[in-house]
C-alpha cells in the first residue's frame, strides 16, 4: 500500500480576502471528489486566521514559515510556532528554496526551524532541492544529502515519523519546466534511501512530495512514481480547478 497522497498548496505571497474566499469556495465544491487525498493550503500568514475560519471540510491549514525560536520574545517580524498552532495550523513549510536563496536561510537555520516546528506541535514540510547549476555540475545528490543531513544531525531519524519532505528542484519552480517523472523518481528514491540508511521503517512511511511546476496535466505521471506521495504546488494552487485537477490525479491513483 502506498502512503496517503498529500496535495499541498503553497500560495506564496499571493491572495486577497476576496480571492481567498473564491479559491476556498472552489475547493469546497469539489472536496468530496478527492476524498482519499489529504489537502493542505498554506496562505500568507496574515490570512491564516480568516482562511482557517473558512476552511473547507477536511482541508488542512499550514504556514509558509516560522521563527526558529520556541518562546515568545523580542524578534520583530517573526512568527512563533505556537501562534501558528493557535490559529489552527497543522503544517509549516520549512526551508523553501525562496527562503534559502532570497532570505539567506542556511541549512543549519532550516534545521532549527524544523526542530522548533516539531516542538510546537507542527508538522514540518522540509523543502530540499538543487539549483540548475548544481544539477549540471552533477552535484544533485551531494546537495540533497547535505540539506537532509543538517536536519538528521540536529533532530535524528525519529523526527521524520512526524515530518514531510518536499523535493523541489529549484530550476523547476515557477519556470514551467517540470522534472521528468524519471528525474523526480530518481531523486525521491535517493532521498528515501538516505532515510532508509538509518531506519527502514521510517523511510517506508515518510511522505515525499514533488514540487516544481506541477499542473493537472503532469500530476498523474509524477504521482504514479513509486516514491512520490503527492505534490507541493505553487502557481497551480491559486486556481481551484487546477488545484483540484491535481488532487484528482492523486485520487485516481489512490483507488488503484
Ligand atoms: P510552482 O511552485 O508549482 O509554481 O513551480 C512550487 C513551489 O515553489 O512550492
Image (cartoon, grey):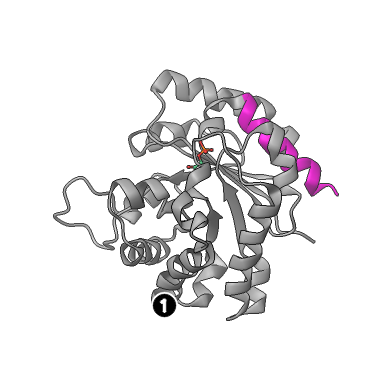
Residue lying farthest to the front in this orientation: 137
Residue lying farthest to the right in this orientation: 256
Foreground residue among 140 and 84: 140
Q: Which residue is mark 1?
A: 153
Residue 180: tell me if it is visible. yes
Magenta portion: prevailing SS class: helix
Q: Quadrant of residue 177?
A: top right
Residue range in magenta is 241-256
Residue 44 position, x and y percent, is 38, 36
Side of 232 relative to 50 (left or right): right
The image shows residue 158, relative to residue 239, as above or below, that is below
Q: Residues within 10 Å of mark 1 (few under 14, many from 20)?
A: few
Residue 208 position, x and y percent, is 61, 58
Task: Quarter of the image for the N terminus: give it.
Answer: bottom right
What kind of element bears circle 1? helix
Residue lying farthest to the left in this orientation: 74
Foreground residue among 50 and 163: 163
Residue 200 lies within the magenta run:
no
Residue occupying the point 40% across, 55% down:
95
Residue 220 position, x and y percent, is 74, 41
Residue occupying the point 69% across, 37% down:
218
- The verdict on label 1 being within 8 Å of ligand 1 is no
Foreground residue among 153 and 101: 101
Residue 57 position, x and y percent, is 61, 36
The image shows residue 139, relative to residue 11, as above or below, that is below
Residue 249 lies within the magenta run:
yes
Residue 129: tell me if it is visible. no
Residue occupying the point 61% across, 64% down:
206
Foreground residue among 221 and 254: 221
Residue lying farthest to the bottom in this orientation: 198
Residue occupying the point 34% across, 49% down:
101
Amino acid at each position: 500500500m502506498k502512503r496517503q497522497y498529500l496535495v499541498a498548496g503553497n500560495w506564496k505571497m499571493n491572495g486577497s480576502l476576496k480571492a481567498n474566499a473564491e479559491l476556498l469556495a472552489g475547493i469546497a465544491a469539489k472536496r468530496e471528489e478527492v476524498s482519499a487525498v489529504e489537502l493542505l493550503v498554506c496562505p500568507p500568514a496574515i490570512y491564516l486566521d480568516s482562511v482557517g475560519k473558512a476552511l473547507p471540510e477536511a482541508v488542512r491549514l499550514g504556514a509558509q514559515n516560522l521563527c526558529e525560536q520556541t518562546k515568545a520574545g523580542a524578534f520583530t517580524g517573526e512568527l512563533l510556532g505556537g501562534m501558528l498552532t493557535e490559529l489552527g495550523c497543522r503544517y509549516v513549510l520549512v526551508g523553501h528554496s525562496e527562503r534559502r536563496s532570497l532570505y539567506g536561510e542556511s541549512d543549519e537555520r532550516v534545521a532549527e526551524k524544523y526542530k522548533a516546528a516539531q516542538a510546537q506541535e507542527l508538522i514540518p514540510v522540509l523543502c530540499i532541492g538543487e539549483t540548475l547549476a548544481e544539477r549540471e555540475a552533477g552535484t544533485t545528490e551531494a546537495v540533497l544529502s547535505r540539506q537532509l543531513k543538517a536536519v538528521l544531525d540536529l533532530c535524528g531519524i525519529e523526527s521524520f515519523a512526524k515530518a514531510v519532505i518536499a523535493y523541489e528542484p529549484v530550476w523547476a519552480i515557477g519556470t514551467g519546466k517540470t522534472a521528468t517523472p524519471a528525474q523526480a523518481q530518481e531523486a525521491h528514491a535517493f532521498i528515501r534511501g538516505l532515510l532508509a540508511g538509518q531506519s527502514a521503517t521510517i523511510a517506508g512511511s515518510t511522505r515525499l512530495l514533488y514540487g516544481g511546476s506541477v499542473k493537472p496535466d503532469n500530476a498523474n505521471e509524477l504521482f504514479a512514481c513509486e516514491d512520490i506521495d503527492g505534490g507541493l504546488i505553487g502557481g497551480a494552487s491559486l486556481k481551484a480547478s487546477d488545484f483540484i485537477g491535481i488532487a484528482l490525479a492523486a485520487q485516481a491513483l489512490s483507488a488503484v
